[in-house]
Amino acid sequence: MHTRRRFMKFSLLGSAALLTGSHSIAKSLADNIVTPVKNDPVVISTWDFGKEANAAAWEVLAKGGKALDAVETGVKVPEADPDNHSVGYGGLPDRDGRVTLDACIMDERYRCGSVMCLEHIVHPISVARMVMEKTPHVILAGDGALQFALSNGFKKENLLTPSSKKAWENWLKKEHYEPEINIENQLHGKHHHPGGVDNHDTIGMVAMDANGDISGACTTSGMAYKMHGRVGDSPVIGAGLYVDNEIGAATATGVGEEVIRIVGSHLVVELMRQGYTPEDACKKTVERMIKVNPEGAPKVQVGFLALNKKGEYGAYALQKGFTYAVRNGREERIYTVKSIY
Ligand code: SD4
């Protein structure tokens, strides 16, 4: 009886610590016995603007919610932000002036959903989730994805904001397509220069909940001024995002063509399976990109971000300037990432 009471007491302490997410260990003051709590929730996401997205995801995680709900909730923040010129509403258009969105989501049971080249919908991530949960498919693209969204209650909207339209009109004067390195951070809010050679951006987010389950989401308007119909890595499961609940998860940002050819996020997860830390797995993956395209890769930016099952995280990039945001019970901060060049 005594033993049972002690057990219940420690279980309750453990749950409290899980719910607040504020301690990795729950300590009984009365008995001075330390009980490890199994999992501290954590959410990480790409670029400085990941901080606001993480805050929304954290509200879900701190209440004991599921990682899948957290990542969807989190990435919806930049999707709806007209000042974020790289994701969702306000995203920069393709060279025909059309805003086409790519997004995918993956949960702890290897279930995944994706939309490619979707127009007129503010929250492509939620359409991707619906593809995962309500259809027998993984990917819907273009008009089919739009029809599916509209028939499931999503509203058709104009996603081209006046400032994105102005940026596109400026671009048309020269029509020079060249991805600008680290444009994601410059494109966010007040740092946006509508006259500049604006290019790409993405939010990739992965999270682990109090249950120890991992999920991820990735959403983008893709490379600005891309050819109409171009799809990047972000909605490609294994490239822009991969989750293996036994091992961890990874996501990518940057020039998608480089990521796709090495199936980057899947490679990061497989390297973690071999025992590499998240940072080292990301570094090896970046090195692979250079190995397979020694001419092209050094000229562009790509960054990988990863989380393992122990809740450890890390990142690596081709170029300087990649950042990511972390939120857990101990910290809310932005890290600057090491790079090859
Ligand atoms: C793409 N990977 O469409 C995306 C763009 C991106 O930060 O991540 N920008 O290729």
Image: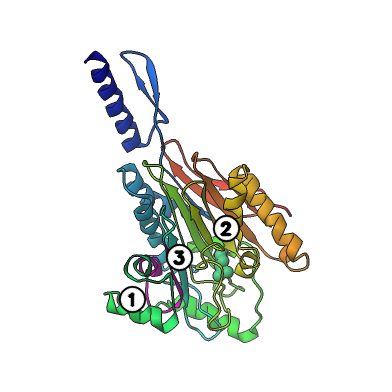
User: Which span is picked out in magenta?
Assistant: 112-129
Tell me the residue that label 1 is attached to. 149
- Which amino acid type corresponds to the residue marked 1 in the rendered image? Ala
Question: Given the current orientation, which residue lies at the most extreme right position?
Answer: 295
Assign the N terminus to one quadrant of the image: top left
Q: Nearer the viewer, residue 190 or 261?
A: 261
- Which amino acid type corresponds to the residue marked 3 in the rendered image? Cys
Tell me the residue that label 2 is attached to. 265
Q: Is residue 264 left or right of residue 17?
A: right
Distance Cα–Cα, label 1 vs label 2: 27 Å
Q: Which mark is residue 104?
A: 3
Q: Earlier in the sequence, mark 1 or mark 2?
A: 1
Q: Is residue 306 visible?
A: yes
Question: Residue 151 placed where, x, y %?
Answer: 28, 79
- Which amino acid type corresponds to the residue marked 2 in the rendered image? Ser
Ligand 1 position by quadrant: bottom right
Question: Residue 293 placed where, x, y %?
Answer: 74, 66
Q: Earlier in the sequence, mark 1 or mark 3?
A: 3
Q: Is residue 117 magenta?
A: yes
